[in-house]
Image: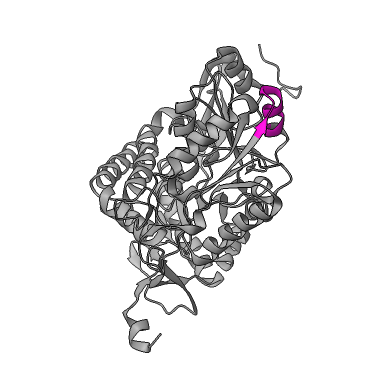
Amino acid sequence: MTMSETEALKRITHLIGHEYWTGTAERTAPVFNPATGEITGRVDLASKELVDEVVRRSSKAAKRWGATSMTRRGRVLFAFRELLNANKEQIAEIITAEHGKTVADALGEVTRGLEVVEFACGIPHLLKGGHSENVSTSVDSYSLLQPLGVVGVISPFNFPAMVPMWFVPIAVAAGNAVILKPSEKDPSAVNAIAELWRRAGLPEDVVNVVHGDKEAVDALLDNREVKAISFVGSTPIARYVYERGTANGKRIQALGGAKNHMLVLPDADLELAADAAVSGGFGSAGERCMAVSVVLATESIADELVAMIAERVRTLKTGNGVGANDMGPIVTEQSRDRIAGYIAAGAEAGASLVIDGREGPFHGDPKGFFVGPTLFDHVSTDMSIYTDEIFGPVLAVVRVSGFEEGLGLINSNAYGNGSVIFTNDGGAARRFEVEVQTGMVGINVPVPVPMAYYSFGGWKDSLFGDSHAHGTEGVHFYTRSKTVTRRWPDPSARGLQLGFPQNN
C-alpha cells in the first residue's frame, strides 16, 4: 500500500467528552470491508495512559451525573431514543460496511437495541427502593439504589450496536458514567451512536468511547476507579476478564461462548423445525452467540428433517450484505479460514458433509471473506465441529434416540447459553424448560433472545459473574443498595441504652 493510499483511509478514533481525539496513536489496526476484502480505515488503539486519563474524566462526570435528578436523566433517555430511531437505517449501513451482515439483519440488531433504550426510559420505577414504617416504635426503615460511579463496557464484533445498548442505556439511566470499548474489527457504529448521546443532551464524559485491544481492556480491568465491567465475547476471554476484574475488586458480568442445541422430537411440526434450524443456524452467517449450531434429531424423523433442512439451505444466497442476499461475508479473513478449517476437520473425522459452504457460489467480490451455509449429518459428540464454538455458518446434526438422550447431551455440554425444543407435546416441553441447564430456553422458536424487560444470559461456561444483561438484573448490576434505619429525636427516647437494640 502506498503512502497516498494510506493517507486516504478513514481514521476511526476515540470519542472523549463528545469530541474526537486529536492525539497521535502509537498503534492502529486495520478495519476491513469484509464483502470486498479491502481495508477501509484504521482505528486508533488506546494506550493505558489514555485509558487512565479517560477514567479520571469519567469519574468527575459520574459525580455530577449521579446527582442529576431522574427526571432530567429521563429526558435525555427519551431524546436519545427518538434520535436512535430516526437514524437506525444509517447505523445499519455502517454495521454492514464493517461487519458484513445484511442490511436487514443489521437493522434488526439496532431495533433490538432500541428496545433496551425504551426499557431504560422507565427506570425511575425500578430505582424506587422500598420503605417500611414503624419497624420498631417510631423507627422507619427504607432502601436506596444508588449508582456505582464509573463502569466499563467491552463489546464484541458480532453485534456492534445491540450489545453496547444492552448495557450503556441502563448504566446511564441509573446515574453512572460509562467507558465503552468496542471491538476494533467494526468500531464505527459505536461512534455514530455516541454522537447521538451528545445530541440528546447527555453531559460530556458521561459516555466516552475508547478504541483498543488487550492493552485497553487490561487498563479498564486494573483501574480501581472503574467499579464494574460488562463484557461479551468468547469463553476464554470472558473467564480472563472475570478473574482479572474480580481480583481488582470489580463487579463483573462476562458473557462467554455458546453451543446452542435444538432438540426435535418425533411429534414436532417438521416444516417449522426445518425453517427454524436454517433461520437460527445461518442468520448473520452464524456469528451469533444465540445461533443454533447443533440439531438433535430423533432417529425416527432424522432422515426427513435433514432432507428438509438441506432443501432450504440450497435456496440461500451468500454475497454482499447490501445486495439481495440472505447471508453476508464473515467478519475477517482469519475467521473465514478458521471456519473453513473446522469444515475440513469435520469431513475428515467422518461426519457426512451434506452441503459444503466453502464451494459457493458467492454473489460478491471474489476477494470477500465468504463462507456459505454448511450442513453436516451423522456428527458424533467427540468431533470438533460439535465440541467447539465455531461461530460461523456450520450446522451439525446429531442423531439421538429420543428426549432423554437429547436432554442429557445438552446438560452435559460445557456451555449453557441457550437451547430450544420443537414438539407439540406440552408435557415434554414443560419438562424440558424445567430440567434443561441453560439460561435461555425456546419452545418452538429458533432463537430465544429475551425481550428487554427480561434478562439475557447463560449458565455454566457461558457466563462468569452473577448478573445477566438488561432487564431487572441489569438495573441491579449498575446500582448498589443502601438501607437506612431512621428515627427522629423524641424527648421520650432520650437516655443511654448500651444493650443490643431490639425491635419492639
Q: Is residue 432 left or right of residue 84?
A: right
Observer able to see residue 204:
no
Please state, as top left, top right, bottom left or bottom right, where the C terminus lies in the image.
top right
Residue closest to the eye, 289 or 326:
326
Residue closest to the eye, 342 or 181:
342
Residue 314: image x %, image y %?
Answer: 43, 45
Please state, as top left, top right, bottom left or bottom right, where the N terminus lies in the image.
bottom left
Residue 62: image x %, image y %?
Answer: 45, 51
Q: Main secondary structure of the magenta part?
A: helix
Q: Is residue 477 left or right of residue 170?
A: right
Residue closest to the eye, 42 or 18:
42
Q: Is residue 497 left or right of residue 310?
A: right
Residue 404 inside the magenta-drawn segment: yes
**Image quadrant assignment for residue 258:** top right
Residue at the extreme right of the image, as rendered: 499
Residue 51 inside the magenta-drawn segment: no
In the rendered view, would you say 4 is above or below 135?
below
Residue shown at 40%/44% (left/top)?
169
State the count of labels. 0
Observer able to see residue 469:
yes
Residue at the extreme left of the image, as rendered: 86
Residue shown at 51%/33% (left/top)?
455
In the rendered view, would you say 165 is above or below 128?
below
Residue 263: image x %, image y %?
Answer: 59, 29
In the rendered view, would you say 439 is above or below 369?
above
Q: How is the image coloured?
A: one colour
Q: Is residue 424 left or right of residue 106?
A: right
Residue 413: image x %, image y %?
Answer: 70, 38
Q: Which residues are magenta?
A: 399-410
Residue shown at 63%/51% (left/top)?
238
